[in-house]
Amino acid sequence: MPRGRPIDPEKHFNKYTADERETIINFNDEDDNALIATRSKAWIKMLDQMGFERVDQGYYFEYLVPKKLVAIRKERKITDEHRKKLSDNMRRVRKGSKDG
């Protein structure tokens, strides 16, 4: 449960430099949840909009989230030819949905 009064991220985190507005994700093999501690306005907004409850708001805004939602993905590399093919397919799909 958050301690004290709610903190406005806009006012609270403006005093930090860009490299100090970090996000830390911590989990272990035993627990089903991950702890996300952040000073990033974008991450705070995203986690709030997703409905995750803040568990603390001291030095960082902290959230407990299900560990299964934490993922690291390999960057997807697409050739120009493949990108054009995907674009053409999407254009056909959109055109077809307007006709229906």
Image: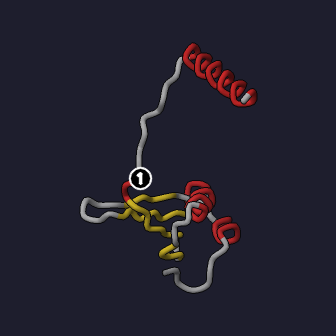
> At 62% from the left edge and 17% from the top edge, which residue is drawn?
84
* Near-viewer residue (57 or 55): 55
Q: Alpha-carbon neighbours of circle 1 within 10 Å: few (<14), some, or many (≥20)?
A: few
Give residue 40's quadrant in the image.
bottom right
Q: Quadrant of the C terminus?
A: top right
Q: Secondary structure at mark 1?
A: loop
Q: Is residue 11 above or below residue 22?
A: below
Give residue 69's quadrant in the image.
bottom left
Which residue is farthest bottom? 4
Q: Position of residue 51 (x, y in %)?
A: 55, 65
Q: Position of residue 16 (x, y in %)?
A: 62, 63
* Near-viewer residue (90 or 27): 90
Residue indicated by mark 1: 70
Q: In the picture provided, is 67 more to the left or to the right than 89?
A: left
Q: Position of residue 65 (x, y in %)?
A: 43, 63
Which residue is farthest top? 81
Which residue is farthest right? 99
> At 45% from the left edge and 59% from the top edge, which residue is drawn?
24
* Near-viewer residue (85 or 48): 85
Which residue is farthest front? 100
Q: Position of residue 17 (x, y in %)?
A: 62, 59
- Number of marks in the rendered image: 1
Give residue 81's quadrant in the image.
top right
Q: Is residue 2 above or below residue 84?
A: below
Q: Is residue 90 above or below residue 58?
A: above
Name the colouring of the figure.
Answer: secondary structure
Q: Amino acid at mark 1?
A: Val
> At 42% from the left edge and 58% from the top edge, which residue is drawn?
25
